[in-house]
Amino acid sequence: MSRTEEINKMTENVYKGILDQFNPSLKNFVTMGKHYEKALTGVTVAAKGYFDALVKLGELASDSQGSKELGDTLFQMAEVHRQIQVQLEDVLKLFHSELLAQLEQKLELDIKYLTATLKKYQSERRSQSESIERCQSQLKKLRRKSQGSRHPNKYGDREMQFVELMSRRQGELDALVATGYKSALTEERRRYCFLVDRQCCVTKLLINYHSKVRELLSQKLSSWQQSCSQPTKLPERALNLLRHTAPQSPGAAGIAEVLRQAKLGTAQPEQVRSCVVYIKPDSWVDSADKTT
């Protein structure tokens, strides 16, 4: 096999590789991308129910004299995360339009285009090869005539013309095959570059999304943590309510002291049980203390 034939085989293999391997793999990639998109869409739907439930808990806390500000915190959490979900929905829309839709459109056009391009290359190469074969056949006939002739020299000029023509046609064929191979590699590279470019676009979307999420959460996190940092310290309005409802008796002084300590967040469970109302200590207080 000549070098030209080797390059021709490599050229055809590149085109067939795109048609038989790259395009089916890309089609599968788009299909998986749609499954991914559907899954993330399902997450946004689930998230809505999750934060609606959080709002309900915030409403319950807002009705409490001792936890009203925590209700406000829960409302803020739900609203911030709702904004995050809106950002995610925007990312999903762009993920579809900037990646999946464009790749799918390319796939629809690519099969026809590449098939036609390969056929055109093969047709031009076949035409060049047949032209060389005809020259070879005519040259052989001419040489047989020259060998059987009494005056072989009279065929010398024509034989030289055929040799030069064959050489020129062979050069044209070599150039055609070389150009065809370069074109095939370029077509292959263009497709991979387009895929990488679209993935870079998605990466930029994700960077922008996560930056906004970080900004939204960072602005609120410290105040949220502060609102739950003293689970045993009652707000002033709750203490005022207790003062107004406390009985005027010899034990009132003890109640006042407990209220003062509750305001400071230092009241002991034994004092609260003996002077106000018994509340069984549980893991809610322990877990809150651990987080602080």
Image (cartoon, rainbow, N blue to C red):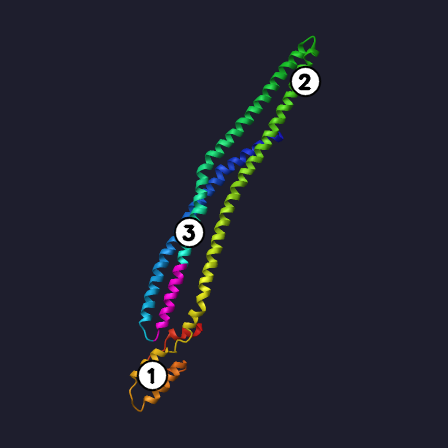
Q: Residues within 10 Å of mark 1 (few under 14, many from 20)?
A: few
Q: Position of residue 107 (x, y in %)?
A: 45, 39
Q: Position of residue 131 (x, y in %)?
A: 58, 21
Q: Residue furthest bottom?
A: 250
Query: Residue at 32% across / 88% down in the picture?
Result: 252
Q: Position of residue 10 (x, y in %)?
A: 57, 34
Q: Earlier in the sequence, mark 2 or mark 1?
A: 2
Q: Position of residue 178 (x, y in %)?
A: 60, 32
On the picture, is 96 further left or further right than 175? Answer: left
Q: CA distance from mark 2 to mark 3?
A: 70 Å
The image's mark for residue 148 is: none
200 inside magenta stretch = no
Q: CA distance from mark 3 to mark 1?
A: 54 Å
Query: Residue at 59% across / 21% down in the picture?
Result: 133
Q: Quadrant of residue 256?
A: bottom left
For discs 2 and 3, the disc positioned in front in the rendered view: 3
Circle 1 is placed at which residue position? 273
78 inside magenta stretch = yes
Q: Earlier in the sequence, mark 3 or mark 1?
A: 3
On the picture, is 173 further left or further right than 36? Answer: right
Q: CA distance from mark 2 to mark 1?
A: 120 Å
Q: Range of the magenta residues?
A: 66-83
Q: Earlier in the sequence, mark 2 or mark 3?
A: 3
Circle 3 is placed at which residue position? 92
The image's mark for residue 160 is: 2
**Depicted 137 relative to depicted 9: above or below:** above
Query: Residue at 35% across / 56% down in the picture?
Result: 45
For discs 3 and 1, the disc positioned in front in the rendered view: 3
- Element under label 3? helix
Which residue type does callout 2 highlight? Met
Q: Residues within 10 Å of mark 2 (few under 14, many from 20)?
A: few
**Depicted 86 relative to depicted 128: above or below:** below
